[in-house]
Image: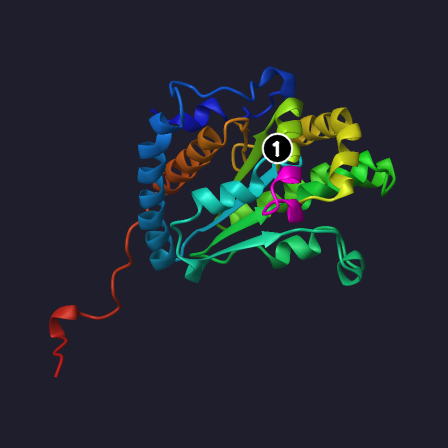
Amino acid sequence: MKWSKHFRVKPGQAVRLADWDATWTGSFKDKDDARDGLRENIARMDELQYLLYAQRKYALLIVLQGMDASGKDGTIRHVMSGLNPQSCYVQAFKEPTPEELDHDFLWRIHHAVPGRGEIGIFNRSHYEDVLVVRVHDLVPRRVWGQRYDQIKAFERILTENNVVILKFFLNTSRDEQRVRLQDRLKDPTKRWKISPADFAERKYWSAYQQAYEEALTKCNAAHAPWFVIPADHRWFRNWAVSQIIVEALEGLKMKFPRPKFNAAHIRIP
């Protein structure tokens, strides 16, 4: 059974995040129930990454989006832990630099797209330009309103050039976000991750939800799908993301390339 269909936004489907249960864990009862599945997926991802690197036909782009404290960093740390850094990297998109602002909003994104044989992980992405800029009126509506079509065209170009795109929205509830922010305040090892701005952003929860709903609806396609991941339970979030990645890579039917020489004729002195 392909689990990815449970989380995938269907092309043409209008997304209402209230309809997606952030606490859902499927047939799993608890963390222990999912532990073996996650371990197996991480091991399988390692095998598939090696194939991807050897074949050098496809690239994999993983996009992680979500509200503050939704678990983007945690997903990278726990799900991608078994990947070989030789052909895998993470790109975090912060506030644009002056140089980046001198170009179109996709310029810095295209620079970070993985090459064939590589896995690229985006911690936030080009979608910030229809999210934060919209919520905080950083650019006029006529500007960000055009970006949905520009993003779709950009992702179409990538997929037509063998970049496999998996976009994950880590869906957390507002109550769970409060718990996680409180935990970060209390824990000295996590306090560095927060700022007063994180708490101020909670005032815009509804506006962000509406912005995400429009992005998930307008920029979803069969070739560049969005997956809405129930993320209130970290352990289930990690399993679900790993499962979808494994299914996508297995679906490529990759094979090791044949050598360009006859190995039977080689004699090692």
Q: Quadrant of residue 236?
A: top left
Which of 2/77 is in front?
A: 77
Report crowding for label 1: few under 14, some 14 to 19, many 20 or more residues within 10 A (C-alpha). Answer: some
Residue 159 in percent (x, y) is at: 53, 45
Relative side of 262 to 253, left or right: left
Query: Which quadrant holds the C terminus?
Result: bottom left
Quadrant of image for the N terminus: top left
Q: How is the image coloured?
A: rainbow
Q: Where is residue 67 in the image (x, y as percent from the top left)?
A: 66, 34
Q: Describe the element under mark 1 as helix, strand or loop.
A: helix
| Image side of residue 76 versus residue 255, left or right | right
User: Which residue is labeled 1 in the image?
Assistant: 180
Find residue 160 and report its horizontal and vertical position in percent. 52, 47
Q: Is residue 159 above or below residue 215?
A: below
Q: Residue at x 57, y 19 (%)?
A: 20
Q: Tell me which residue sits at (56%, 26%) in the image.
A: 11
Q: Give the range drawn in magenta.
A: 184-193
Does 95 sit above or below residue 145? Answer: below
| Residue 172 in magenta stretch | no
Q: Is residue 236 visible?
A: yes
